């Protein structure tokens, strides 16, 4: 997938990238088995940024095997399911104190007073954090309500329509 295609997919999913929804980070753990973790995220316009404690097991796992996938999903009674799926490589930077994007991500879904309390609690808790940046190398946006489907489902729908025409 070339950068133009990735950028188009990400642009189509702009509201998901700005949403307070959790993302799901898939990676390979130190023991070689797959893991999926719900994570808060912040989109910088170039990277999806996740943060965790410097001592979290996923930090060592991502250093050893940095290839990851992320999924941001939204589905509610008013809209059909939508998903942004991303693949990339995790780049880890150790940060003294709290990763700023971690706080920015929390503000997306909190009232200002709650966000200020959360920030203070984080600053009291974390002496050091791991900033995990994922630059998309592949991305797909699906909107099931508008028919923007995975290719295999689109093909099945077309075959079904042809059979019933």
Image (cartoon, rainbow, N blue to C red):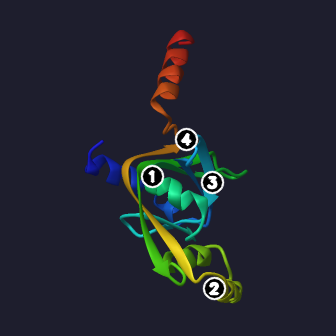
Pick the front one: 148 or 29: 29
126 up-or-down from 93: above or below: below
Real-space CA distance between mark 2 and mark 4, rounded to the nearest whole angstrom: 34 Å
N-terminal of the pair, mark 2 or mark 4, is 4
Pick the front one: 108 or 117: 117
Q: Which labelled disc corresponds to residue 32?
A: 4
Indicate the secondary structure of the residue bearing disc 3: strand
Crowding at mark 1 (Cα within 10 Å: few <14, some 14-19, many 20+): few
Mark 3 vs mark 1: give the one in front: 1
N-terminal of the pair, mark 1 or mark 2, is 1
- Tell whether label 2 touches label 3 (CB within 8 Å): no
The residue wearing badge 2 is 119
Indicate the secondary structure of the residue bearing disc 4: loop
N-terminal of the pair, mark 4 or mark 3, is 4
Mark 2 vs mark 4: give the one in front: 4
Real-space CA distance between mark 3 and mark 1, rounded to the nearest whole angstrom: 17 Å
Real-space CA distance between mark 3 and mark 2, rounded to the nearest whole angstrom: 22 Å
Crowding at mark 2 (Cα within 10 Å: few <14, some 14-19, many 20+): some
- Tell whether label 4 touches label 2 (CB within 8 Å): no
| Residue 117 drawn at (x, y percent) | 70, 88
The residue wearing badge 1 is 64
Real-space CA distance between mark 1 and mark 2, rounded to the nearest whole angstrom: 30 Å
Q: Residue at x 45, y 57 (%)?
A: 63
Pick the front one: 80 or 162: 80
1 up-or-down from 101: above or below: above
Q: Residue at x 40, y 64 (%)?
A: 47
N-terminal of the pair, mark 3 or mark 2, is 3
In this rendering, the count of numbered labels is 4
């Amino acid at each position: 997938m070339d950068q133009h295609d990735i950028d188009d997919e990400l642009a189509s999913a702009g509201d998901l990238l700005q949403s307070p929804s959790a993302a799901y980070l898939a990676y390979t753990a130190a023991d070689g088995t797959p893991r999926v973790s719900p994570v808060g995220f912040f989109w910088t316009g170039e990277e999806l940024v996740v943060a965790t404690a410097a001592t979290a097991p996923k930090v060592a796992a991502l250093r050893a095997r940095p290839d990851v996938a992320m999924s941001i999903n939204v589905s509610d009674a008013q809209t059909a399911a939508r998903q942004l799926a991303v693949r990339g490589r995790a780049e880890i930077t150790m940060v003294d104190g709290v990763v700023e994007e971690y706080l920015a991500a929390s503000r997306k879904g909190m009232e200002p007073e709650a966000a200020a309390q959360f920030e203070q609690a984080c600053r009291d808790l974390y002496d050091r954090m791991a900033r995990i940046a994922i630059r998309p190398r592949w991305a797909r946006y699906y909107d099931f309500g508008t028919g923007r489907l995975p290719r295999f489902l689109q093909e099945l729908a077309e075959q079904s329509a042809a059979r019933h025409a």
